[in-house]
Amino acid sequence: MTRKAGSAFGKAALTVSVAAAVGSGLFATHGMTDDATAWRSAFARPSALAVPDGIPDTEAQVELGRTLFFDPVLSRSRSISCATCHEPSRHWGDGRMRGIGEPGIELKLRTPTLLNVGWIAPLGWDGKFPDLESVAFTPITGPNLMNLSEEELIARLRADPDYVAAFAATFEDREITRGGIERALAAFQRTIVSGSAPFDRWRDGDASAIGASAKAGFALFNGKAGCHECHGGWAFTDGSFHDIGVGRDDDIGRGRLFPTSKSLQYAFKTPTLRDVAQRGPYMHDGSVATLRDVIDLYDRGGIERPSRSPKIRPLHLSETEKADLLAFLDTLTAAEPKQKAASK
């Protein structure tokens, strides 16, 4: 994937019709157009990495950020790093029901994946972070997370000749600063992009890349089940916030930031569905164990309350339709090797 400024959403040539790939009329049966150009364009992968404020990250920033991301020096006990909770081998999450901080305290929320995080600001389950740069010091300084003060972190890095040299070579001011740490970590995280999956090969014209059940599931996803209304586009997320009928009474999500908004009470970030079959448990609080349980939740419509999204309603899916949706979701997992830690 080539880095360049400008739009990250280049269009690929569109050659194979949906009718030929799926079966004539199947999409139309489920309420979606059979027009190949329309649906292929809607799910086109980006042709370049996300660019912050029109200024591309440099390779030096990315490599410095990679080193910081995997270095436990960022935690008070020097025992955990960013990668402890965002493990490459676990699709950039931790596979837990809820996150665990340095003191061994279970957090209230599940650790979100970092896949495609450069495109989906604002960030956080409640959207309190406007961009990637603004995220970095919350886990680092959080007493229940990495538990290290900004002052101590900068002192540690300034005492390390390798970091002194790396920051001097990366930033114009040649100094180790909070801003430099934020930019470097964000630059690396913008390179965390989901790999090519069977769905992408199918979208690009390989009719045999996914099976008949998955193709039927994709039609349901964009039709009767309505999944695409929140999980649209190449990353399968609208980047927005919805109450989907889950959550505890004392956890109101984005409603904390917008207390007068009825629709944002219990609203949480729509996660990407990339690699979703490998990223359980599910929901912001890890309260749904399996992907089949997620489909069942949507099928019955979740908790009925004033803030629940009008998009959430009983779906009346058959067992075959649920199996087809699962088959489709399985096609979103990439088989490419995950990123490794940088040597320091």
Image (cartoon, grey):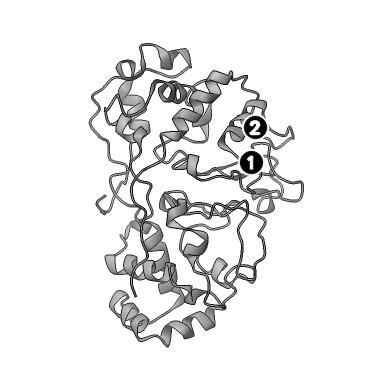
Q: Which residue is mark 1?
A: 288
Q: Are marks 1 and 2 in contact (CB under 8 Å)?
A: yes
Q: Residue 286's spot in the image, x, y percent?
A: 63, 47
In the depicted view, which residue is nearer to us: 267 or 66?
66
Tell me the number on the disc at residue 297.
2
Tell me the number on the disc at residue 43.
none
Q: In the rendered image of this protein, does residue 10 appear above or below residue 337? A: above
242 to the left or right of 7: right
Q: Residue at x 50, y 30 (%)?
A: 326
Q: Residue 252's spot in the image, x, y percent?
A: 70, 48
In the depicted view, which residue is nearer to us: 187 or 294?
294
Whether residue 168 can be seen here = yes
Q: Residue at x 69, y 53 (%)?
A: 256
Mark-to-mark CA distance, 1 and 2: 9 Å
Q: Residue at x 41, y 71 (%)?
A: 68
SS label for mark 2: helix
For label 2, count other residues whose C-alpha is less than 10 Å away and answer few (under 14), some (14-19) or many (20+).
some
